Image: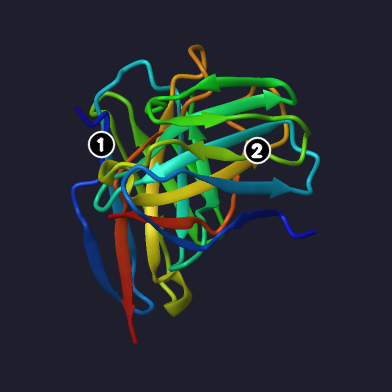
Amino acid sequence: NAGVTQTPKFRILKIGQSMTLQCAQDMNHNYMYWYRQDPGMGLKLIYYSVGAGITDKGEVPNGYNVSRSTTEDFPLRLELAAPSQTSVYFCASSKRPGLVTDTQYFGPGTRLTVL
Amino acid sequence: DQQVKQNSPSLSVQEGRISILNCDYTNSMFDYFLWYKKYPAEGPTFLISISSIKDKNEDGRFTVFLNKSAKHLSLHIVPSQPGDSAVYFCAASDTDSNYQLIWGAGTKLIIKP
C-alpha cells in the first residue's frame, strides 16, 4: 500500500494563477481531509469529505474548492492564488465514518509558495 | 484565538532521559486528545491518544497524562531515543460536535546523544 500520496511536492505560483493539488489514498478510507499548516501554527482544516460525492467546509475554506468523485481521490483546487495561501498543504484520510477519534493517515505534504 | 497551545516551540533532551511535552487547551468541551509525530518532509503520524474519561494512557515508552481541571495534557517519553527527534503535535476534539481536530503549533524535540 502506498497510503496517502500527494502531488506535487513543491510548487511556486504567481498571484492570480490557479492550480489543483492532487491527493489519493489506496486504503479504501471513507473520510478524507485537507489541511494547511502555516509557519509556527498548527494544522487547520480546509475541507473534508465523508465519502464520494460528499464534501463539507472546515475552518478555513475560503479561496479553495474540492470535489470527491471517487473514494480514492480528493483534489484541492486553488482559484486566483494569493500570497496568504503560501503554506504547506497536507491531505489525510481515515477509515471509520463518523468517528473523529479514528487515526488519520497523512500524505507527505505539498509546499506551495505564491509570489 | 488558539484553543490548543503548545507553549514550548522546542525542547532538547539527553538521550536516555525523560522527555516531557506539554499541551494546554481552553475549550472545556474537548473530550478526546491525540498526539502526532512529524519528521521533516513527511506528514504527521499518529502516536497516542486519550479520552477525557481517563487521566492516563500508556503505550510502550509513551505515556499521555490528562489533567481536566487544569485543561492540561502532557506526553512523556521514557527513555528518549535519537529516533524520537521530531515535531510533536497535540490535537483535540469535541467528539459531539463535528469531525474537526484542533491542532497545537507543535514542539520540536531534539534528542542529544
Horizontal arrangement in the rendering, residue B42 relative to residue A39 (left or right): right
Can you name the residue that lies furthest to the bottom here?
Answer: B113
Please tell me which residue is depicted at 30% across the width and 48% down the height of the picture: A38
Q: Secondary structure at mark 1?
A: strand
Q: CA distance from mark 2 to mark 1?
A: 32 Å
Q: Position of residue A94 (x, y in %)?
A: 66, 37
Horizontal arrangement in the rendering, residue B77 relative to residue A32 (left or right): left
The quadrant the C terminus of chain A occupies is: bottom left
Q: Position of residue B18 (x, y in %)?
A: 34, 66
Query: What's the residue type where badge 2 is placed?
Result: Phe
The quadrant in which residue A85 appears is top left
Q: Nearer the viewer, mark 2 or mark 1?
A: 2
* Location of mark 2 (residue): A74
The chain identifier of the residue carrying mark 2 reads A
- Residue A48's disc number: none
- How many residues crowd mark 2 within 10 Å: few (<14), some (14–19), many (20+)? many
Horizontal arrangement in the rendering, residue B69 relative to residue B51 (left or right): left
* Location of mark 1 (residue): B24
Asked if residue B9 is positioned above or below residue A26 in the image, the reply reads: below
Q: Secondary structure at mark 2?
A: loop
Asked if residue B11 is positioned above or below residue B76 in the image, the reply reads: below
Q: Position of residue A22 (x, y in %)?
A: 61, 48
Front position in the image: A63 or A91:
A63
The quadrant in which residue B79 appears is bottom left
- How many residues crowd mark 1 within 10 Å: few (<14), some (14–19), many (20+)? many
Please tell me which residue is depicted at 31% across the width and 47% down the height of the picture: A15
Front position in the image: A79 or A55:
A79
Q: Position of residue B26 (x, y in %)?
A: 24, 25
Can you name the residue that lies furthest to the top here?
Answer: B96
The quadrant the N terminus of chain A occupies is: bottom right
Please tell me which residue is depicted at 28% across the width and 48% down the height of the picture: B22
The chain identifier of the residue carrying mark 1 reads B
